[in-house]
Image (cartoon, rainbow, N blue to C red):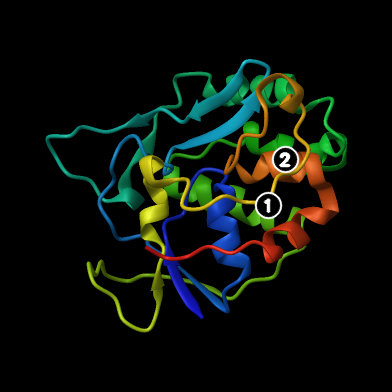
Amino acid sequence: MSILLHPTYFPSIAHFVAIVNSEQVVFEVDDNFVKQTYRNRTYIYGANGKLALNIPVIYTQKNRQKYKDVKIFNKEKWQSLHWKSLLSAYRTSPFFEYYEDELQPLFELKSDYILDFNMTCFEVICECLQLELNTSKTQVFQKTIENKTDFRYLVNVKKEQIQPFETYTQVFSNKHGFIPNLSILDLLFNEGPNALNYLESQTLTPL
């Protein structure tokens, strides 16, 4: 099965369930940028519950911009803030130290474009998961597609929970219970090498 989806910032577990259960992944890179989506946002499990990490971007609603042309607003120290948030949330998780050296450089890497940064993060996560993929990118935007399963709707935060996934142990679950479909980072830090087995065992039904 070939799937089509948007590259996002440290993709949600739903994204990765779709990815690991596909034969080919095609990334939508010729669409228009839309704010308040997973394109520049991911959710982690903080001490006070679900926490959003947003990448600030230079974008105006008046002039439509292609996703691939949207720049990051690097005058804000967002990378430092995000890394500190991850440290606070996951330093006591079973596998944070296991992946720390691979992930930490991403929060010092200076990227001009949000799409480029998201793709770099995705590549590092695949290395952490030891996941080899057959990937490609779109050349033109098509609203309706054939011969691929369209998972582009997963970029919409409001449609994030399509179906319940199996629970796993989270750092603060004794405080706030299980929070499903967070960033892949949550699964990685809590499940480590078992994360890929977890993803392969879940199912996601396309809308």
Distance in Å between CA atoms under marks 1 and 2: 7 Å
Residue at the image position 73 percent from the left and 27 percent from the top: 173
Q: Quadrant of residue 197?
A: bottom right
Which percent across, then down, holds residue 150? 38, 68
Q: Is residue 42 above or below residue 122?
A: above
For residue 54, the mark is none
Q: What amino acid does circle 2 point to?
A: Leu
Q: What amino acid does circle 1 point to?
A: Val
Assign a secondary structure to mark 1: helix
Assign a secondary structure to mark 2: helix
Q: Is residue 76 visible?
A: yes
Which percent across, then down, holds residue 124? 68, 52
Q: Is residue 54 above or below residue 11?
A: above
Residue pushed farthest bottom?
147
Q: Are marks 1 and 2 in contact (CB under 8 Å)?
A: yes
* Quadrant assignment for the C terminus: bottom left
Tell me: 10 left or right of 192: left
Residue at the image position 80 percent from the left and 46 percent from the top: 191
Residue at the image position 46 percent from the left and 54 percent from the top: 7
Which percent across, then down, holds residue 11? 55, 48
Tell me: 17 left or right of 91: left
Q: Is residue 120 visible?
A: no
Of callouts 1 and 2, which one flags the residue occurring earlier in the amino acid sequence? 2
Total labels drawn: 2
Tell me: 165 left or right of 150: right
Q: Is residue 82 above or below residue 147?
A: above
Q: Quadrant of residue 4?
A: bottom left
Tag 2: Cα neighbours inside 10 Å, few (<14), some, or many (≥20)? Answer: some
Residue at the image position 55 percent from the left and 47 percent from the top: 12
Say which residue label 2 marks: 103
Which percent across, then down, holds residue 169? 78, 38
For residue 124, the mark is 1
